[in-house]
Image (cartoon, rainbow, N blue to C red):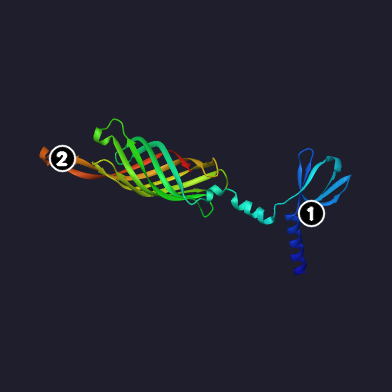
Amino acid sequence: MKKQFVLLFMLCVAMAAQAELVTLKNGTQIRGTIVVQNDEVVIVREASGARYQYPRAEVLSIAEEKETVQEKEEEVKTVGLGHQKKASIALEAGVGASVFPNDGKAGVAYSVDLLVGSHNLADKRIFVGGGVGYHGDWLGGQPKEFNSYSFLPVQAVLRMPLIVQKHAPMFGVSLGYGIALSKQYVGGLYADVLFGYRYEISSKTSLGVCANLSFQQARVTVQETPLETLPEAVYTNQAGRSILRAGLKMSLFF
């Protein structure tokens, strides 16, 4: 019984590999095996076993399918071939709002990142890599030396679609260290989480539009004067600062 099943399976595969393509005059195409063909009728059996009968006058052409099962498998393997490249570059730009919980202040945040990494990790269209960027925060109405903050984040990143399809929801996370670019303060831990949607422009290029929430740690040099002391008692101190940012970020993968 088992041997008969194997023979039947091999016969079906052979039939599917040698199927013929019947094209009707209305443009409909049917793939299958020709069971009957004469001047009056054409009967086609599809791979599922279903049979269809068409008047010969409605048939435009009958052509042998030269595509083999192996060729079909190779075609499946090449779908989205552009996503199988080993390396990719991503450009990201964002804008939003900054909140400084320690000071009870808010400002405007902006960012630009250049990332390099894998384009299609584990054949799941996952981007994994790292890079650098320029992140800044601007606070209006503050002294000049404290109205802007800028960092150079060195980061590892993950950008992952939640569904493996052409257009899909996307989740991302970045983790690294933000190097301060002004002498009056030093940088610290940087983390960013984003969620949005990625659109495939071509097999090699896609665009992501996401909402993001990030955290930047920093320390600022400040001057402090103890109460009821002489002016010469002024001293400098390092005050901790946490910067929270929320906004929109666009990612271009190519």
Q: Residue furthest right?
A: 40
On the picture, is 64 further left or further right than 179? right
Query: Which residue is at a point 32% across and 42% down the rendered structure image?
Result: 151
Q: From this viewpoint, is residue 136 visible? A: yes
Query: Which residue is at a point 24% across and 44% down the rendered structure image?
Result: 239
Residue 101: which numbered mark, if any? none
On the picture, is 208 further left or further right than 132? right
Which of the two discs, 1 and 2, labels the residue nearer the N terminus? 1
State the SS at label 1: loop
Query: Which residue is at a point 10% across and 39% down the rendered structure image?
Result: 232
Q: How many marks?
A: 2
Q: Callout 2: few (<14), some (14-19), or many (20+) C-alpha neighbours within 10 Å?
A: few
Residue 49: which numbered mark, if any? 1
Front-lying residue, 17 or 138: 17
Front-lying residue, 15 or 108: 15
Disc nearest the viewer among 1 and 2: 1
Hey, what amino acid is under mark 2?
Answer: Leu
Q: Determine whether label 1 and label 2 are within 8 Å by CB.
A: no
Residue 31 on image: x %, y % = 75, 49
Residue, disc 2: 227
Residue 177 on image: x %, y % = 33, 49
- Which part of the image, by quadrant, shows the N terminus? bottom right
Hey, what amino acid is under mark 1?
Answer: Gly
Q: Callout 1: few (<14), some (14-19), or many (20+) C-alpha neighbours within 10 Å?
A: few
Q: From this viewpoint, is residue 230 visible? A: no
Residue 48 on image: x %, y % = 76, 53
Residue 33 on image: x %, y % = 79, 52
* Cα separation between marks 1 and 2: 94 Å
